[in-house]
Every structure is written in structure tokens, then in C-alpha cells.
Image (cartoon, rainbow, N blue to C red):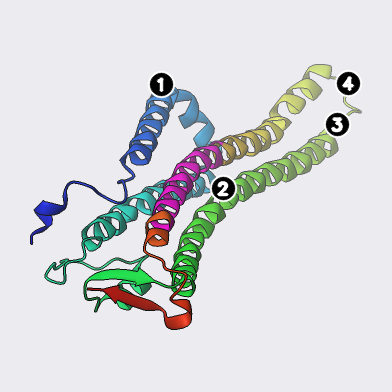
Amino acid sequence: MSMDDLDDGNVLDLPRVYLVKMMVFILLVAIMAAVLYPQFKKAFMTNPGLNGMIVVVLLLGIGYALRMVWRLFREVNWVNHFRVADPGLEIPYSPNLLAPMEALLANRQGATVLSPTTLRSLLDSLASRLDEARDISRYMIGLLVFLGLLGTFWGLLQTVASVGNVIQSLDVGSADSSTIFDDLKSGLEAPLAGMGTSFSSSLFGLSGSLILGFLDLQASQAQNRFYNSLEDWLASLTDIEIGEGGQATVP
């Protein structure tokens, strides 16, 4: 039997809709960034080091979110090919998230029947691996917020220090008011630059966290759908009368 014979009656659906949503959202963000490029460039240059780090983390997070959904394609295809109770069927690749399931059911003969204990063990293993992937994505979201806040406080510290220097440098005893005003204008350049650092980092950090938050939401929905669909399928293979025996097969 070839895999081409398995196109009909798939157990699980591929998460194409979630991947399409993510790609459309990324495209819209890219279009918005292109339209507002002059403003973004000006804000970026107020602190290119920290803002560049925020952009790098954002790009890594986008790639990781897409990878979380993309890796489900391999798992879904493996389940859809494995579902046929045919010992002669060969699957040319192995799953990653479902590796324990593959190891447990590799030597099946005929239709597979699971015990409730085996079912729970397989689902717990899958849930643990999915949660691990989500933890990394959520850490990146928190990292973007942290970098934005770091830039905010960094800019505020620069502003406070610069204002203090301006006040100390003013010669209030001078009779020439125009000189005092010119010194004040030149001295305020540093505090305003600090405010630019503060607001630009907050802008990039919070915007990046919102972008990754939406992508993480779509990836989580795709993973939850995969988990629930797999649970429904495995439940249909479970026989509560098997008890602790683990796995049985029906010839």
C-alpha cells in the first residue's frame, strides 16, 4: 500500500488556516512598517543598539512562532498515515512530538487498541512537549517588553542627569538674558535625546510584543486543535476493559 492511497479520510487536518493567518498578519505588519518607514527610521536611530536588539528578538520570535505551526504538519501527516491498520505500510519519516507514540506502537499487528493508562501517558507526553515550545515563545514576548522598559528607564536616567547638568551650568548671575537662553536651549538637547531613547524603545518593544502575542495565539490555537483532534482519535482506539495491559491488537 502506498501513501497516495491515504489521501481520503484523514484523521487530523493540517493547520494550514493558522499558518495562513500568521502569514497574512506578518504581511500587513510589513506593509505598515514600509508606509511608516521614515518615522520608524528616525525613532530607531535615537538608540540603534537597543532598538536593533529588539528587532532581532522580534524576528527570532516570528521565525519560532512559524516553526511551532510548521512542525505540526509532520506530526499530522504521520498520524494520518499511521491510522491505517496495515503492517505493510511504511512511513518514510518519524515524528518528533509523537516519538513516544511511535515507539509504543511501532510493532503493531492489525488494528491497535489502547488502555486508558496508555492513552493518558501518550497525551501527557505530548502536552509536555507542546508546553515547552510555548514557554520559549512566551519568554520572547516577555523579553521584548523587558527591553522596551529597559530603554524607557535608560532614557529617563539620561534625561534626569542631563537636566541636572543644565541647571548647574546656567549662569544666573549673568546680565545677558540672551546668553542664558542660548545656554538653556543647547543644554536641553541632551534631555530631549534621552526622552527620544525612552519613547522609541518603548515603541519598538511594546509593538514587537503585540506582534509576537498574536502569532503565539495562532500557534497555540493550532497546537490545541492538534492535541484535541489527536485525543479524540486515540480515545476511539481505547478500550477501558484492557486495564493496565497497555496495548492490545485486534487481528
Identify the disc placed on residue 71.
none
Relative to 153, is 127 on the left or the right?
Answer: left
Outermost residue toward the front in this view: 241
Determine the residue positioned at 48% across, 78% down: 243
Relative to 183, is 200 on the left or the right?
Answer: left
Relative to 155, is 204 on the left or the right?
Answer: left
- First along the sequence among labels 3 and 1: 1
Q: Residues within 10 Å of mark 3 (few under 14, many from 20)?
A: some
Label 1–label 4 contact, CB within 8 A: no
Pair 2/1: label in front: 2
Do we see residue 47 in this rendering?
no
What kind of element bears circle 1? helix
User: Of the residues shown, which amino acid type is indicated by label 1?
Assistant: Val
Which residues, given as a range, are shown in magenta?
207-231
Query: In this picture, is 242 found above or below 194?
Result: below
Pair 2/3: label in front: 2
Pick whichever, 120 or 205, lies toward us.
120
Residue position for label 4: 175
| Separation of residues labelled 2 and 3 (CA atoms) | 43 Å
User: Of the residues shown, which amino acid type is indicated by label 3?
Assistant: Asp
Pair 1/4: label in front: 1
Residue position for label 3: 171
Identify the disc placed on residue 144.
2
Residue 177's x, y, as percent? 83, 18
Determine the residue positioned at 25% across, 56% down: 80
User: Of the residues shown, which amino acid type is indicated by label 2?
Assistant: Leu
Q: Residues within 10 Å of mark 2 (few under 14, many from 20)?
A: many
- First along the sequence among labels 2 and 3: 2
Outermost residue toward the left in this view: 1
Label 3–label 1 contact, CB within 8 A: no
| Separation of residues labelled 3 and 4 (CA atoms) | 9 Å
What kind of element bears circle 4? loop
